Amino acid sequence: ARVRSSNHKRRTRTMFRLWQGLTRFPAFVPLWSARSALSSFSGVPPLSQTSAKWDNLTEPAKEYVREKFHLCSAKEVHICDGSESENELLLDYLTKRHTIQKLTHSNFENCYLARTDPADIARVEGKTYICTKNRQDAVSPVKFGASATLGNWMSDESMDFLLQQKRFPGSMEGRAMYVIPFSMGPVGSPLSKIGIQLTDSPYVVCSMRIMTRMGQPVLDHLAKTNENFTKCLHSLGRSKGMKDSWPCDPDNTVIAHFPDRNEICSYGSGYGGNSLLGKKCLALRIASTLAYKEGWLAEHMLILGVTNPQGEKKYFAAAFPSACGKTNLAMMRPTLPGWTVECVGDDIAWMRIDSSGVLRAINPESGFFGVAPGTSKWTNPYCMNSIRKNTIFTNVASTSENGKTGIFWEGLEDEVDIENENIRIASWDGKRWDTTSDFVAAHKNSRFCTPASQLEIIDPAWEDPEGVPISAILFGGRRPTTVPLVYEALDWNHGVFVGASMRSMATAASIEGTMTTRPVHDPFAMKPFFGYSFGNYLRHWLGMQDRPGVKLPKIFHVNWFRTEKRRAPHAEEMKEVFLWPGFGENSRVLEWIFK
Protein backbone atom coordinates (compact mmCIF):
# COMPACT_ATOMS: atom_id res chain seq x y z
CA ALA A 1 0.00 0.00 0.00
CA ARG A 2 2.86 2.38 0.81
CA VAL A 3 4.43 1.62 -2.59
CA ARG A 4 1.14 2.28 -4.41
CA SER A 5 0.66 5.49 -2.42
CA SER A 6 4.21 6.63 -3.21
CA ASN A 7 3.78 5.92 -6.93
CA HIS A 8 0.46 7.78 -6.94
CA LYS A 9 2.05 10.80 -5.27
CA ARG A 10 4.92 10.72 -7.77
CA ARG A 11 2.53 10.60 -10.75
CA THR A 12 0.41 13.38 -9.23
CA ARG A 13 3.48 15.54 -8.67
CA THR A 14 4.68 14.95 -12.23
CA MET A 15 1.27 15.84 -13.70
CA PHE A 16 1.11 18.95 -11.53
CA ARG A 17 4.56 20.09 -12.76
CA LEU A 18 3.51 19.51 -16.35
CA TRP A 19 0.29 21.48 -15.84
CA GLN A 20 2.24 24.17 -14.01
CA GLY A 21 4.73 24.42 -16.86
CA LEU A 22 2.03 24.64 -19.51
CA THR A 23 0.12 27.35 -17.68
CA ARG A 24 3.25 29.28 -16.83
CA PHE A 25 4.70 28.94 -20.32
CA PRO A 26 1.72 28.92 -22.73
CA ALA A 27 2.73 27.81 -26.24
CA PHE A 28 6.28 28.16 -24.86
CA VAL A 29 6.40 31.89 -25.38
CA PRO A 30 8.97 33.32 -22.94
CA LEU A 31 7.85 35.64 -20.18
CA TRP A 32 9.45 39.07 -20.06
CA SER A 33 8.27 40.22 -16.63
CA ALA A 34 10.55 42.73 -14.96
CA ARG A 35 10.10 41.58 -11.38
CA SER A 36 11.56 44.45 -9.43
CA ALA A 37 9.97 43.22 -6.21
CA LEU A 38 11.86 39.91 -6.27
CA SER A 39 13.96 39.00 -3.28
CA SER A 40 17.68 39.47 -3.87
CA PHE A 41 18.10 35.73 -3.27
CA SER A 42 15.33 34.68 -5.65
CA GLY A 43 16.24 32.21 -8.34
CA VAL A 44 15.00 34.53 -11.11
CA PRO A 45 16.49 37.98 -11.76
CA PRO A 46 14.59 40.86 -13.37
CA LEU A 47 14.45 40.18 -17.09
CA SER A 48 15.11 42.61 -19.90
CA GLN A 49 12.24 43.92 -22.00
CA THR A 50 14.53 43.98 -25.06
CA SER A 51 15.19 40.24 -25.23
CA ALA A 52 15.14 38.35 -28.50
CA LYS A 53 11.72 37.01 -29.49
CA TRP A 54 10.68 33.39 -29.28
CA ASP A 55 9.65 33.51 -32.94
CA ASN A 56 13.28 34.18 -33.90
CA LEU A 57 14.23 30.66 -32.89
CA THR A 58 14.20 27.97 -35.56
CA GLU A 59 11.85 25.03 -35.08
CA PRO A 60 14.67 22.64 -34.02
CA ALA A 61 15.77 25.22 -31.42
CA LYS A 62 12.22 25.62 -30.10
CA GLU A 63 11.84 21.87 -29.81
CA TYR A 64 15.14 21.64 -27.90
CA VAL A 65 14.11 24.37 -25.45
CA ARG A 66 10.68 22.79 -24.89
CA GLU A 67 12.16 19.40 -24.11
CA LYS A 68 14.77 20.64 -21.62
CA PHE A 69 12.43 23.17 -20.01
CA HIS A 70 10.16 20.34 -18.84
CA LEU A 71 13.03 18.01 -17.96
CA CYS A 72 14.72 20.56 -15.68
CA SER A 73 11.49 22.14 -14.30
CA ALA A 74 12.79 25.66 -14.83
CA LYS A 75 10.80 28.55 -13.38
CA GLU A 76 10.73 30.44 -16.68
CA VAL A 77 12.73 31.01 -19.86
CA HIS A 78 14.80 33.96 -20.99
CA ILE A 79 16.23 34.09 -24.52
CA CYS A 80 19.44 36.11 -24.41
CA ASP A 81 20.00 38.85 -26.96
CA GLY A 82 23.50 39.81 -25.76
CA SER A 83 22.57 43.47 -25.25
CA GLU A 84 24.32 45.77 -22.81
CA SER A 85 21.10 46.36 -20.87
CA GLU A 86 20.59 42.61 -20.43
CA ASN A 87 24.18 42.21 -19.22
CA GLU A 88 23.81 45.04 -16.69
CA LEU A 89 20.65 43.48 -15.25
CA LEU A 90 22.34 40.12 -14.79
CA LEU A 91 25.47 41.64 -13.25
CA ASP A 92 23.33 43.63 -10.84
CA TYR A 93 21.40 40.49 -9.89
CA LEU A 94 24.62 38.51 -9.32
CA THR A 95 25.94 41.32 -7.14
CA LYS A 96 22.82 41.30 -4.97
CA ARG A 97 23.17 37.53 -4.59
CA HIS A 98 26.81 38.03 -3.52
CA THR A 99 27.92 35.73 -6.34
CA ILE A 100 30.11 38.55 -7.62
CA GLN A 101 31.50 41.74 -6.10
CA LYS A 102 32.05 44.93 -8.06
CA LEU A 103 35.59 46.32 -8.01
CA THR A 104 35.49 49.97 -6.97
CA HIS A 105 39.19 50.76 -7.09
CA SER A 106 40.03 53.50 -9.60
CA ASN A 107 42.22 51.07 -11.57
CA PHE A 108 39.15 49.11 -12.69
CA GLU A 109 36.12 49.95 -14.80
CA ASN A 110 33.07 47.69 -14.86
CA CYS A 111 35.03 44.77 -13.38
CA TYR A 112 33.78 42.08 -10.98
CA LEU A 113 35.19 39.39 -8.70
CA ALA A 114 33.55 35.98 -8.28
CA ARG A 115 34.43 33.48 -5.55
CA THR A 116 33.37 29.91 -6.25
CA ASP A 117 32.54 27.11 -3.89
CA PRO A 118 35.85 25.60 -2.63
CA ALA A 119 34.86 22.30 -4.26
CA ASP A 120 34.26 23.91 -7.68
CA ILE A 121 37.58 25.40 -8.72
CA ALA A 122 38.84 23.61 -11.86
CA ARG A 123 38.00 21.24 -14.69
CA VAL A 124 36.95 17.78 -13.54
CA GLU A 125 38.65 15.58 -16.10
CA GLY A 126 37.83 12.41 -14.18
CA LYS A 127 34.12 13.19 -14.52
CA THR A 128 34.26 14.20 -18.18
CA TYR A 129 33.08 11.62 -20.71
CA ILE A 130 32.88 11.00 -24.43
CA CYS A 131 29.68 9.03 -25.04
CA THR A 132 29.33 6.84 -28.12
CA LYS A 133 27.78 3.52 -28.97
CA ASN A 134 31.15 1.84 -29.49
CA ARG A 135 34.02 2.35 -27.04
CA GLN A 136 36.71 2.28 -29.73
CA ASP A 137 35.19 5.37 -31.35
CA ALA A 138 36.01 7.43 -28.24
CA VAL A 139 39.17 5.94 -26.73
CA SER A 140 41.94 3.77 -28.14
CA PRO A 141 41.88 0.04 -27.30
CA VAL A 142 43.77 -0.99 -24.13
CA LYS A 143 44.57 -4.30 -22.54
CA PHE A 144 41.79 -6.02 -20.61
CA GLY A 145 41.48 -4.52 -17.15
CA ALA A 146 43.48 -1.39 -17.99
CA SER A 147 41.92 2.06 -18.04
CA ALA A 148 42.25 4.51 -20.91
CA THR A 149 44.57 7.46 -20.24
CA LEU A 150 43.45 9.72 -23.09
CA GLY A 151 39.80 10.21 -22.20
CA ASN A 152 36.87 8.58 -20.43
CA TRP A 153 34.15 6.66 -22.21
CA MET A 154 30.60 5.74 -21.29
CA SER A 155 27.99 4.31 -23.61
CA ASP A 156 25.48 6.87 -24.81
CA GLU A 157 22.62 4.75 -23.44
CA SER A 158 24.13 4.55 -19.94
CA MET A 159 24.88 8.26 -19.88
CA ASP A 160 21.40 9.12 -21.13
CA PHE A 161 19.91 7.13 -18.26
CA LEU A 162 22.18 8.87 -15.74
CA LEU A 163 21.36 12.35 -17.04
CA GLN A 164 17.68 11.92 -17.80
CA GLN A 165 16.81 9.99 -14.64
CA LYS A 166 19.36 10.99 -12.00
CA ARG A 167 20.76 14.44 -12.75
CA PHE A 168 18.65 16.87 -14.76
CA PRO A 169 15.04 16.15 -13.64
CA GLY A 170 14.05 19.13 -11.48
CA SER A 171 17.60 20.53 -11.50
CA MET A 172 16.48 24.08 -12.35
CA GLU A 173 13.54 24.36 -9.94
CA GLY A 174 13.17 27.94 -8.78
CA ARG A 175 15.62 29.24 -11.37
CA ALA A 176 15.29 30.75 -14.83
CA MET A 177 16.50 28.88 -17.90
CA TYR A 178 18.65 31.13 -20.09
CA VAL A 179 18.84 30.37 -23.81
CA ILE A 180 22.23 31.48 -25.16
CA PRO A 181 22.59 31.43 -28.98
CA PHE A 182 26.32 31.70 -29.71
CA SER A 183 28.84 31.39 -32.51
CA MET A 184 32.32 29.95 -32.16
CA GLY A 185 34.20 32.03 -34.69
CA PRO A 186 32.99 35.08 -36.63
CA VAL A 187 29.27 34.81 -37.41
CA GLY A 188 28.89 33.48 -40.94
CA SER A 189 32.51 32.34 -41.38
CA PRO A 190 32.91 29.02 -43.25
CA LEU A 191 35.09 27.91 -40.32
CA SER A 192 32.58 28.84 -37.58
CA LYS A 193 30.08 26.67 -35.69
CA ILE A 194 26.80 27.64 -33.99
CA GLY A 195 25.65 26.45 -30.57
CA ILE A 196 22.66 26.99 -28.30
CA GLN A 197 23.38 26.67 -24.59
CA LEU A 198 20.64 26.33 -21.98
CA THR A 199 21.78 27.22 -18.46
CA ASP A 200 20.43 28.29 -15.08
CA SER A 201 23.54 30.36 -14.24
CA PRO A 202 23.58 34.13 -14.88
CA TYR A 203 27.35 34.00 -14.25
CA VAL A 204 27.63 31.68 -17.26
CA VAL A 205 25.53 34.05 -19.40
CA CYS A 206 27.78 37.02 -18.57
CA SER A 207 30.94 34.97 -19.20
CA MET A 208 29.65 33.52 -22.49
CA ARG A 209 28.93 37.06 -23.64
CA ILE A 210 32.66 37.71 -23.30
CA MET A 211 34.00 34.40 -24.61
CA THR A 212 31.70 33.94 -27.63
CA ARG A 213 29.76 35.95 -30.20
CA MET A 214 26.28 35.60 -28.73
CA GLY A 215 22.79 37.00 -29.04
CA GLN A 216 20.67 38.46 -31.82
CA PRO A 217 23.19 38.25 -34.70
CA VAL A 218 23.44 34.50 -34.13
CA LEU A 219 19.64 34.12 -34.10
CA ASP A 220 19.44 36.09 -37.35
CA HIS A 221 22.08 33.84 -38.93
CA LEU A 222 20.27 30.69 -37.78
CA ALA A 223 16.97 31.97 -39.13
CA LYS A 224 18.56 32.72 -42.50
CA THR A 225 20.56 29.50 -42.90
CA ASN A 226 18.69 27.01 -40.66
CA GLU A 227 22.05 25.27 -40.16
CA ASN A 228 22.66 22.61 -37.55
CA PHE A 229 23.70 23.74 -34.08
CA THR A 230 25.40 22.09 -31.13
CA LYS A 231 22.96 21.43 -28.29
CA CYS A 232 24.46 22.48 -24.96
CA LEU A 233 22.63 21.86 -21.67
CA HIS A 234 24.09 23.08 -18.37
CA SER A 235 22.65 23.14 -14.86
CA LEU A 236 24.17 24.03 -11.52
CA GLY A 237 22.05 21.22 -10.12
CA ARG A 238 20.39 20.74 -6.78
CA SER A 239 22.88 22.71 -4.72
CA LYS A 240 24.87 20.73 -2.19
CA GLY A 241 27.86 23.04 -2.02
CA MET A 242 29.17 25.04 0.92
CA LYS A 243 28.20 28.50 -0.38
CA ASP A 244 24.64 29.71 -0.95
CA SER A 245 25.98 32.32 -3.36
CA TRP A 246 27.56 29.65 -5.59
CA PRO A 247 25.14 26.74 -6.19
CA CYS A 248 26.78 23.52 -7.29
CA ASP A 249 26.60 19.77 -6.76
CA PRO A 250 30.27 18.71 -6.75
CA ASP A 251 29.70 15.11 -5.70
CA ASN A 252 27.44 14.47 -8.68
CA THR A 253 29.15 16.61 -11.31
CA VAL A 254 29.31 15.10 -14.78
CA ILE A 255 30.23 16.54 -18.19
CA ALA A 256 29.07 14.44 -21.13
CA HIS A 257 29.76 14.81 -24.84
CA PHE A 258 27.73 13.02 -27.52
CA PRO A 259 29.70 13.48 -30.78
CA ASP A 260 27.30 11.38 -32.88
CA ARG A 261 24.40 13.73 -32.15
CA ASN A 262 26.42 16.95 -31.65
CA GLU A 263 25.33 17.48 -28.04
CA ILE A 264 26.90 18.44 -24.69
CA CYS A 265 25.44 18.07 -21.19
CA SER A 266 27.06 19.47 -18.03
CA TYR A 267 25.65 19.07 -14.53
CA GLY A 268 26.72 20.24 -11.10
CA SER A 269 29.52 22.75 -11.71
CA GLY A 270 29.59 26.49 -12.32
CA TYR A 271 33.35 26.75 -12.93
CA GLY A 272 34.14 28.16 -16.38
CA GLY A 273 35.89 25.12 -17.87
CA ASN A 274 32.90 22.95 -16.93
CA SER A 275 30.06 25.41 -17.59
CA LEU A 276 31.09 27.62 -20.53
CA LEU A 277 30.23 24.89 -22.99
CA GLY A 278 31.39 26.79 -26.05
CA LYS A 279 34.96 26.66 -24.76
CA LYS A 280 36.72 23.30 -24.24
CA CYS A 281 33.56 21.22 -24.63
CA LEU A 282 32.48 22.46 -28.07
CA ALA A 283 35.62 24.16 -29.36
CA LEU A 284 37.83 21.12 -28.72
CA ARG A 285 36.03 17.87 -27.80
CA ILE A 286 33.03 18.16 -30.14
CA ALA A 287 34.87 20.26 -32.74
CA SER A 288 37.75 17.76 -32.98
CA THR A 289 35.21 15.08 -33.90
CA LEU A 290 33.58 17.35 -36.48
CA ALA A 291 37.04 18.22 -37.81
CA TYR A 292 37.90 14.53 -38.21
CA LYS A 293 34.71 13.94 -40.21
CA GLU A 294 35.00 17.14 -42.28
CA GLY A 295 38.77 17.19 -42.90
CA TRP A 296 40.07 20.04 -40.71
CA LEU A 297 41.79 20.47 -37.31
CA ALA A 298 40.47 21.72 -33.94
CA GLU A 299 43.47 22.21 -31.65
CA HIS A 300 44.49 23.50 -28.22
CA MET A 301 46.71 26.18 -29.76
CA LEU A 302 47.41 29.89 -29.60
CA ILE A 303 47.74 31.89 -32.83
CA LEU A 304 50.11 34.85 -33.15
CA GLY A 305 51.44 37.05 -35.92
CA VAL A 306 55.18 37.85 -35.99
CA THR A 307 56.52 40.78 -38.04
CA ASN A 308 60.27 41.32 -38.63
CA PRO A 309 61.96 44.74 -38.97
CA GLN A 310 61.56 44.56 -42.77
CA GLY A 311 57.77 44.34 -42.45
CA GLU A 312 57.44 40.67 -43.41
CA LYS A 313 54.74 38.91 -41.38
CA LYS A 314 54.18 35.24 -40.59
CA TYR A 315 51.62 33.50 -38.39
CA PHE A 316 52.47 30.71 -35.94
CA ALA A 317 50.24 28.32 -34.00
CA ALA A 318 51.50 26.81 -30.73
CA ALA A 319 50.20 23.98 -28.54
CA PHE A 320 51.05 24.07 -24.83
CA PRO A 321 49.12 22.45 -21.97
CA SER A 322 46.99 24.79 -19.82
CA ALA A 323 48.96 27.10 -17.51
CA CYS A 324 52.18 26.65 -19.53
CA GLY A 325 52.49 30.16 -20.95
CA LYS A 326 50.19 30.25 -24.00
CA THR A 327 48.71 33.62 -23.06
CA ASN A 328 52.11 35.16 -22.28
CA LEU A 329 53.51 34.01 -25.62
CA ALA A 330 50.45 35.14 -27.58
CA MET A 331 50.72 38.63 -26.03
CA MET A 332 54.48 38.93 -25.96
CA ARG A 333 56.38 42.22 -25.96
CA PRO A 334 59.56 41.28 -27.90
CA THR A 335 62.94 42.39 -26.58
CA LEU A 336 64.40 42.24 -30.10
CA PRO A 337 64.43 45.73 -31.68
CA GLY A 338 62.09 46.14 -34.64
CA TRP A 339 60.16 42.91 -34.07
CA THR A 340 56.45 42.94 -33.23
CA VAL A 341 54.00 40.28 -32.10
CA GLU A 342 50.22 40.51 -32.53
CA CYS A 343 47.67 38.15 -31.01
CA VAL A 344 44.97 36.28 -32.92
CA GLY A 345 44.08 33.94 -30.05
CA ASP A 346 45.61 32.51 -26.89
CA ASP A 347 43.96 29.09 -26.47
CA ILE A 348 42.16 27.42 -29.39
CA ALA A 349 42.75 27.24 -33.14
CA TRP A 350 40.49 25.85 -35.86
CA MET A 351 42.54 25.17 -38.99
CA ARG A 352 41.44 24.23 -42.48
CA ILE A 353 43.33 23.81 -45.77
CA ASP A 354 42.08 26.38 -48.29
CA SER A 355 41.70 26.03 -52.06
CA SER A 356 45.35 27.02 -52.55
CA GLY A 357 46.61 24.30 -50.20
CA VAL A 358 47.46 26.73 -47.38
CA LEU A 359 46.57 25.86 -43.78
CA ARG A 360 44.48 28.77 -42.44
CA ALA A 361 43.35 29.26 -38.82
CA ILE A 362 40.75 31.19 -36.87
CA ASN A 363 40.35 31.81 -33.16
CA PRO A 364 36.81 30.55 -32.42
CA GLU A 365 36.65 32.53 -29.16
CA SER A 366 36.09 36.25 -28.62
CA GLY A 367 37.67 36.55 -25.18
CA PHE A 368 40.54 35.42 -22.99
CA PHE A 369 40.05 33.05 -20.05
CA GLY A 370 43.56 33.28 -18.64
CA VAL A 371 45.31 32.06 -15.50
CA ALA A 372 45.83 35.03 -13.16
CA PRO A 373 48.77 34.06 -10.84
CA GLY A 374 52.07 35.03 -12.42
CA THR A 375 50.49 37.57 -14.77
CA SER A 376 51.96 41.03 -14.19
CA LYS A 377 53.24 44.13 -15.93
CA TRP A 378 56.62 42.43 -16.13
CA THR A 379 55.46 39.10 -17.56
CA ASN A 380 52.52 40.30 -19.70
CA PRO A 381 52.05 44.09 -19.81
CA TYR A 382 49.55 44.02 -22.68
CA CYS A 383 47.32 41.58 -20.83
CA MET A 384 47.45 43.66 -17.64
CA ASN A 385 46.29 46.72 -19.57
CA SER A 386 43.40 44.84 -21.20
CA ILE A 387 41.93 43.40 -17.97
CA ARG A 388 41.36 46.81 -16.38
CA LYS A 389 37.79 47.02 -17.69
CA ASN A 390 34.79 44.79 -18.55
CA THR A 391 36.46 41.80 -16.88
CA ILE A 392 35.20 39.05 -14.57
CA PHE A 393 37.86 37.73 -12.20
CA THR A 394 37.33 34.39 -10.48
CA ASN A 395 39.01 33.14 -7.29
CA VAL A 396 41.67 35.85 -7.02
CA ALA A 397 42.27 37.68 -3.74
CA SER A 398 40.54 40.99 -2.98
CA THR A 399 42.01 44.14 -1.47
CA SER A 400 40.25 46.79 0.56
CA GLU A 401 41.68 50.28 1.07
CA ASN A 402 39.63 53.28 2.18
CA GLY A 403 36.45 51.48 1.18
CA LYS A 404 37.71 50.75 -2.34
CA THR A 405 37.87 47.15 -3.55
CA GLY A 406 40.65 45.86 -5.78
CA ILE A 407 42.32 42.54 -6.57
CA PHE A 408 45.58 40.76 -5.87
CA TRP A 409 47.34 37.55 -6.83
CA GLU A 410 50.84 36.16 -6.57
CA GLY A 411 52.87 38.14 -9.09
CA LEU A 412 51.35 41.56 -8.35
CA GLU A 413 53.64 42.35 -5.42
CA ASP A 414 55.17 45.27 -7.34
CA GLU A 415 51.72 46.72 -8.13
CA VAL A 416 49.93 46.24 -4.80
CA ASP A 417 51.65 47.44 -1.63
CA ILE A 418 50.98 44.33 0.42
CA GLU A 419 53.10 45.68 3.30
CA ASN A 420 50.76 48.67 3.71
CA GLU A 421 48.82 48.24 6.95
CA ASN A 422 45.90 50.20 5.49
CA ILE A 423 45.35 47.56 2.79
CA ARG A 424 43.43 44.50 3.94
CA ILE A 425 43.70 41.42 1.73
CA ALA A 426 41.19 38.58 1.69
CA SER A 427 42.25 35.34 0.03
CA TRP A 428 40.21 33.64 -2.69
CA ASP A 429 38.28 31.70 -0.05
CA GLY A 430 37.65 34.74 2.17
CA LYS A 431 40.44 34.35 4.76
CA ARG A 432 42.53 37.25 6.01
CA TRP A 433 45.86 37.11 4.20
CA ASP A 434 49.24 38.79 4.63
CA THR A 435 52.87 38.08 3.78
CA THR A 436 53.23 35.75 6.77
CA SER A 437 50.30 33.51 5.77
CA ASP A 438 51.10 29.86 4.99
CA PHE A 439 48.48 29.68 2.21
CA VAL A 440 48.15 31.38 -1.16
CA ALA A 441 46.16 34.57 -1.66
CA ALA A 442 44.76 33.64 -5.08
CA HIS A 443 43.89 30.10 -6.09
CA LYS A 444 46.50 28.63 -8.42
CA ASN A 445 43.79 28.22 -11.08
CA SER A 446 42.18 31.62 -10.55
CA ARG A 447 41.14 33.28 -13.80
CA PHE A 448 40.32 36.47 -15.64
CA CYS A 449 37.64 36.55 -18.35
CA THR A 450 38.10 39.57 -20.59
CA PRO A 451 37.09 40.64 -24.15
CA ALA A 452 39.72 40.04 -26.84
CA SER A 453 38.79 43.29 -28.57
CA GLN A 454 40.29 45.26 -25.65
CA LEU A 455 43.80 43.92 -26.27
CA GLU A 456 45.94 46.69 -27.76
CA ILE A 457 48.00 44.21 -29.83
CA ILE A 458 45.04 42.24 -31.17
CA ASP A 459 45.85 41.29 -34.76
CA PRO A 460 43.93 43.24 -37.45
CA ALA A 461 42.93 39.90 -39.03
CA TRP A 462 41.77 38.22 -35.81
CA GLU A 463 38.16 38.18 -37.03
CA ASP A 464 38.91 37.50 -40.70
CA PRO A 465 36.31 34.86 -41.65
CA GLU A 466 38.85 33.15 -43.93
CA GLY A 467 41.44 32.86 -41.16
CA VAL A 468 45.19 33.59 -41.21
CA PRO A 469 47.86 31.48 -43.03
CA ILE A 470 49.95 29.34 -40.66
CA SER A 471 53.70 29.12 -41.40
CA ALA A 472 54.84 27.16 -38.32
CA ILE A 473 53.38 24.96 -35.58
CA LEU A 474 55.07 24.86 -32.16
CA PHE A 475 54.70 22.18 -29.49
CA GLY A 476 55.93 22.62 -25.93
CA GLY A 477 55.41 22.12 -22.21
CA ARG A 478 57.01 22.40 -18.80
CA ARG A 479 60.12 20.18 -18.96
CA PRO A 480 62.68 21.00 -16.23
CA THR A 481 65.25 18.54 -17.63
CA THR A 482 66.43 16.88 -20.84
CA VAL A 483 64.45 18.78 -23.51
CA PRO A 484 66.35 21.64 -25.26
CA LEU A 485 65.17 25.19 -25.80
CA VAL A 486 64.08 24.66 -29.42
CA TYR A 487 64.43 22.14 -32.23
CA GLU A 488 62.86 21.63 -35.65
CA ALA A 489 61.13 18.45 -36.81
CA LEU A 490 62.69 16.72 -39.81
CA ASP A 491 59.41 16.54 -41.75
CA TRP A 492 55.63 16.34 -41.22
CA ASN A 493 55.72 12.71 -40.02
CA HIS A 494 58.43 13.52 -37.48
CA GLY A 495 56.47 16.62 -36.42
CA VAL A 496 53.40 14.49 -35.70
CA PHE A 497 55.62 12.20 -33.62
CA VAL A 498 56.93 15.23 -31.70
CA GLY A 499 53.39 16.33 -30.92
CA ALA A 500 52.33 12.81 -29.99
CA SER A 501 55.24 12.34 -27.56
CA MET A 502 54.79 15.62 -25.66
CA ARG A 503 55.17 15.50 -21.88
CA SER A 504 54.73 18.31 -19.35
CA MET A 505 54.68 18.90 -15.61
CA ALA A 506 51.10 18.78 -14.29
CA THR A 507 49.43 22.11 -13.53
CA ALA A 508 46.51 23.34 -11.42
CA ALA A 509 44.23 23.81 -14.44
CA SER A 510 42.41 20.60 -13.51
CA ILE A 511 41.56 18.92 -10.24
CA GLU A 512 43.72 15.96 -11.23
CA GLY A 513 46.64 18.27 -12.05
CA THR A 514 47.20 18.98 -8.37
CA MET A 515 47.81 15.29 -7.58
CA THR A 516 51.22 14.71 -9.20
CA THR A 517 54.57 16.47 -9.49
CA ARG A 518 56.05 14.42 -12.34
CA PRO A 519 55.80 15.02 -16.10
CA VAL A 520 52.69 13.51 -17.62
CA HIS A 521 52.12 12.43 -21.20
CA ASP A 522 50.04 15.13 -22.90
CA PRO A 523 50.04 14.54 -26.67
CA PHE A 524 49.41 17.68 -28.72
CA ALA A 525 48.40 19.37 -25.39
CA MET A 526 45.06 17.65 -26.03
CA LYS A 527 45.05 14.94 -23.35
CA PRO A 528 41.92 16.31 -21.59
CA PHE A 529 40.22 17.34 -24.83
CA PHE A 530 40.23 14.48 -27.34
CA GLY A 531 36.74 13.95 -28.73
CA TYR A 532 37.54 10.66 -30.43
CA SER A 533 40.08 7.82 -30.48
CA PHE A 534 43.71 8.94 -30.35
CA GLY A 535 44.63 6.35 -32.98
CA ASN A 536 42.22 7.97 -35.43
CA TYR A 537 43.47 11.40 -34.32
CA LEU A 538 47.06 10.47 -35.32
CA ARG A 539 45.81 8.98 -38.57
CA HIS A 540 43.99 12.25 -39.29
CA TRP A 541 47.10 14.38 -38.65
CA LEU A 542 49.33 12.12 -40.75
CA GLY A 543 46.77 12.18 -43.56
CA MET A 544 46.91 15.98 -43.89
CA GLN A 545 50.11 15.67 -45.99
CA ASP A 546 48.28 13.54 -48.57
CA ARG A 547 45.96 16.35 -49.67
CA PRO A 548 46.57 17.41 -53.30
CA GLY A 549 48.67 20.58 -53.54
CA VAL A 550 48.92 21.03 -49.76
CA LYS A 551 51.58 23.41 -48.34
CA LEU A 552 51.91 22.38 -44.71
CA PRO A 553 53.77 24.49 -42.11
CA LYS A 554 57.04 23.43 -40.47
CA ILE A 555 56.84 21.94 -36.96
CA PHE A 556 59.04 22.87 -33.96
CA HIS A 557 59.31 22.01 -30.26
CA VAL A 558 60.16 24.61 -27.59
CA ASN A 559 60.82 24.46 -23.85
CA TRP A 560 61.09 27.67 -21.82
CA PHE A 561 61.18 25.79 -18.50
CA ARG A 562 64.55 24.01 -18.36
CA THR A 563 66.04 24.38 -14.84
CA GLU A 564 69.19 23.66 -12.88
CA LYS A 565 70.16 23.89 -9.23
CA ARG A 566 72.22 26.93 -8.26
CA ARG A 567 73.32 28.49 -5.00
CA ALA A 568 72.50 32.16 -4.68
CA PRO A 569 75.20 34.45 -3.21
CA HIS A 570 75.48 34.00 0.57
CA ALA A 571 72.81 31.27 0.50
CA GLU A 572 73.30 27.88 2.12
CA GLU A 573 70.87 25.80 0.06
CA MET A 574 70.75 25.04 -3.64
CA LYS A 575 67.71 26.41 -5.51
CA GLU A 576 66.04 25.44 -8.80
CA VAL A 577 66.34 28.32 -11.30
CA PHE A 578 65.29 28.67 -14.94
CA LEU A 579 68.10 28.54 -17.49
CA TRP A 580 66.20 30.67 -20.00
CA PRO A 581 64.80 34.13 -19.05
CA GLY A 582 61.61 33.58 -21.07
CA PHE A 583 58.82 36.13 -21.63
CA GLY A 584 60.02 38.86 -24.05
CA GLU A 585 63.30 37.01 -24.63
CA ASN A 586 61.29 34.23 -26.26
CA SER A 587 61.24 36.51 -29.30
CA ARG A 588 64.78 35.26 -29.99
CA VAL A 589 63.40 31.75 -30.45
CA LEU A 590 60.57 33.08 -32.63
CA GLU A 591 63.18 34.90 -34.77
CA TRP A 592 65.05 31.61 -35.34
CA ILE A 593 61.79 29.86 -36.26
CA PHE A 594 60.78 32.80 -38.49
CA LYS A 595 64.02 32.47 -40.47
Image (cartoon, rainbow, N blue to C red):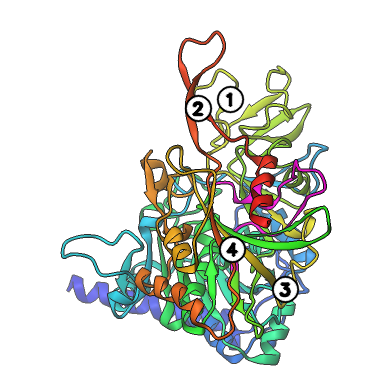
Q: How far apart in space, not on screen, are marks 2 and 1 (Cα)?
A: 8 Å
Q: Secondary structure at mark 2?
A: loop
Give the image quarter of residue 452. Answer: bottom right
Tell us which disc is closer to us: 4 or 2: 4
Between the residue at mark 4 and the residue at mark 2, the CA separation in whole angstroms equals: 32 Å
Residue at 26% of width from left, 76% of height from top? 7
The answer to whether residue 299 is left or right of residue 209 is left
For marks 2 and 3 on the same chain, the one whose residue lies earlier in the sequence: 3
Secondary structure beneath label 4: loop
Q: Residues within 10 Å of mark 3 (few under 14, many from 20)?
A: many
**Comes first in the chain, label 3 or label 4:** 3
Q: Can residue 528 be seen by looking at this rendering?
A: no
Residue visible at 37% across and 59% down in the picture:
127
Few, some or many C-alpha atoms within 10 Å of disc 4 (few <14, some 14-19, many ≥20)?
Answer: many
Residue 10 at x, y = what percent? 32, 74
In the rendered image, residue 3, in percent from the top left (x then y), is placed at 20, 73
Q: Nearer the viewer, residue 473 or 213?
A: 473
Q: Is residue 429 left or right of residue 401?
A: left
- At label 1, the amino acid type is Trp
Choose the circle earlier in sequence order: 2 or 1: 1
As helix, strand or loop, the secondary structure at mark 1 comes to: strand
Q: Which residue is mark 4?
A: 348
Q: Which mark is residue 433?
A: 1
Q: Which span of residues is magenta-colored?
A: 324-349
* Location of mark 3 (residue): 81
Image quadrant occupied by the N terminus: bottom left
- The residue labelled by disc 2 is 439
